[in-house]
Amino acid sequence: MAKEYFHLVEAVRLADKWFDVSIQEIVRQFHAVGKLEVHGDVDVIDPNSGSVETVPVRLKASGNAEYSISWDLALLLHNVRIDGFGWEGMPFPDILKGGECKGWHRHIWNPATGNADGKTCVDIYEVPLLSVEDFAIWGLRAMNVGFNRKDESARLF
Amino acid sequence: MNQLACSEIRESIAGLFADRAQIAKLKDYCVVTLPLQTVDNRHVSLIVEQGIGDTFLVHDGGKTESALFAQGVNVTQNKLEYLRASAGCYGVTIADNHLIQKICKLRTLNATILEVAQCAILTSQEIIGHKVSFEEENIARRLKSVFADWHPPFLEKVVFQGTVHGETATHNFPVIAFPKRAQQRTVAIKVLYPSHPQWQAERYGFLVHDIRSQPIYGSWVRMAVISRSDEWPKKAVDLVRNLSHETIEIPTGTEIEAIDSVPSLVADLMTNRAA
């Protein structure tokens, strides 16, 4: 029977996570197909039981490399986004800082909706200056996501 | 309703667009954001690129599909065909790189922007079919748990996350089952996920070609497990089938039953090939 881990979302967001993918591979996938999905696990303590739970999570990166407004980074649990980054051109309410802002934002988990549909603006370069690589490195670090320093796939190409 | 009220509504709508529409210049194109909400709770942003003369390309930059993908929605080939047909009603196309786009002249630019926006909104309705999934969790992890409890007499050992060195690159199999007898064959299991299936299949093809010529790995039995096979185009599945000794296709929602049956298939592959 599969387990449900939504009560551990905050712990998963805060925990150091690691995915077997290199930044170079993410950049290549942006250019090649505009989609990348990597599966991984993260160990967190379940406050209900006090035991360590190994929670399966997925990292997704997507968008057309040519058009930065399309780029998204997301961390998913049970096929639901629990963290991530994206861009929106219309001002939206910043649920952490208050007021409105637009552009690059982080998705904030909302227990009421069971989704990371809250948004808070983030300080990142202006879109024209941003490269896919910068975006991936910046976003993964902000989400406490570690990646493979060795680019094993390089020799595939 | 009298004529004055109608004109007020007209002015109000025109004012809404004038006040809320956003425009930004990035690189050599313009990004237009309209006060039109998508089904997945964004506002539509479109890119307008000028071509030769007064020709323009209006498209979504791939944002619609990227946003869906980031929320756990995979646009399958079947869905894509349906969406293409819907977009076609507006003279809009969904390109191979999934850009929702239309080419126009300056005189029809405004109408084209609205048409492409409508198609982006239509496509965003795919979020409605989005499902929380507890069953499709890491198949490799499920395989590990199933094989950790598997101890048939002919099995020497199971290696998890086994690395093999191909002719030009290093590859990884989540499960490799080694037999006790040299006459029996090692079975290596590879899990393929539905993130861009054709690419996954071709990448798997590279793995197979890269290890096939190696003296040890070349004799291994290759078993491919295709996750969410209902989201794979036939062409990609066929490619994987042609490159594998055994292929297990797992439709969405049937992961547990399918994975639980893998050890018996591995046993067949190992023992049926015994000399």
Image: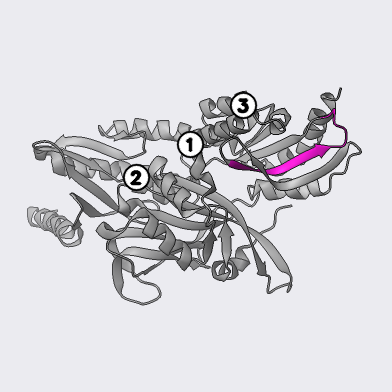
Q: Are marks 2 and 3 in contact (CB under 8 Å)?
A: no
The residue that mark 1 highlights is B76
Q: Which residues are magenta?
A: B170-184
Q: Earlier in the sequence, mark 2 or mark 3?
A: 2
Left/right of residue B104 with respect to residue B74 in the rendered view: left
Q: Chain of mark 2?
A: B
Residue A27's spot in the image, x, y percent? 42, 49
Q: Chain of mark 1?
A: B
**Which of the labelled discs sits on residue B161, or is there none?**
none
Left/right of residue B124 with respect to residue B3 in the rendered view: right
Q: Chain of mark 3?
A: B
The residue that mark 2 highlights is B62
Mark 2 and mark 3: Cα distance apart in space: 32 Å
Give B274 or B166, whichever is nearer the viewer.
B166
Q: Is residue B234 above or below residue B7?
A: above
Residue B261 appearing in the image: no
Residue B82's spot in the image, x, y percent? 41, 32
Mark 1 and mark 3: Cα distance apart in space: 23 Å
Give, as a three-letter code, the residue at label 3. Leu
Residue B240's spot in the image, x, y percent? 59, 29
Q: Specify whether residue B133 is painted magenta.
A: no
The residue that mark 3 highlights is B243
Left/right of residue B247 with respect to residue A37 in the rendered view: right
Q: Is residue A140 above or below residue B52?
A: below
